[in-house]
Image (cartoon, grey):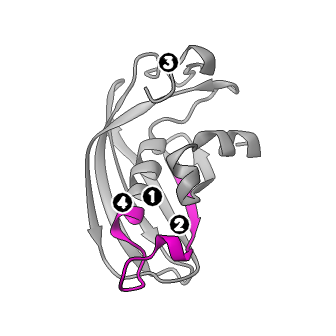
Amino acid sequence: MSQAEKSDALMGYHDLLGMRVVEWQPGRAMIELTIEPKHLNRSNNVHGGVLTSMLDSALSLAGLHCSVPGNIRKGMTLSLTTTFVSPARKGILTATGTLRGGGKKTYMASGEIRDTQGNLVAIGEGSFRRRGGSESPEGVPEETSGKPGE
């Protein structure tokens, strides 16, 4: 996956949090986030909402890899379960999502977040739905994939 494809994979809210795609291939996605003060709760741990957002993105992307440069696949979260295992306060977090099964439209993925030392921070699993045109691994040209926010 090229650097341009990685940077195009996440935008908007993901940019706001500072998430970046570091690996994306069929059935697997990895997202990193460098912990900053804005990510912390009042106990100086990474906020659970940040961890859940990382898992949501990594798990979703695991089922949306596109094999055609310039095309895109989109999806939506149907359900997401997050279990917080241990706190994180500094360093880099890595969320890994793995496709577990499903069909053309609906798929399931699971994953985890680890800190810089390799400690397990959170685990999650979810169900996702590919949007129209995104059922095929070839996806659709980005300009015909719908309006922003769809």
Kindly identify the residue that appears in the image at 45 percent across and 58 percent down.
54
Alpha carbon of mark 4 to alpha carbon of mark 2: how far?
12 Å
Identify the amino acid type marked 4: Thr
* Magenta highlight range: 29-51
The kind of secondary structure element at disc 4 is helix
Residue 146 badge = 3
Q: Secondary structure at mark 3?
A: loop
Q: Is residue 4 magenta?
A: no
- Discs 1/2, front: 1
Marks 3 and 2, Cα distance to the nearest angstrom?
30 Å
Tell me the amino acid under the disc marked 3: Gly
Residue at 56% across / 74% down in the picture?
Answer: 36
Crowding at label 4, few (<14), some or many (≥20) Cα neighbours within 10 Å?
Answer: many
Where residue 97 appears, as percent x and y from the top left, is: 44, 53
The amino acid marked with disc number 1 is Met
* Label drawn at residue 94: 2
Give, as a three-letter code, the residue at label 2. Answer: Thr
Q: CA distance from mark 3 to mark 1?
A: 24 Å
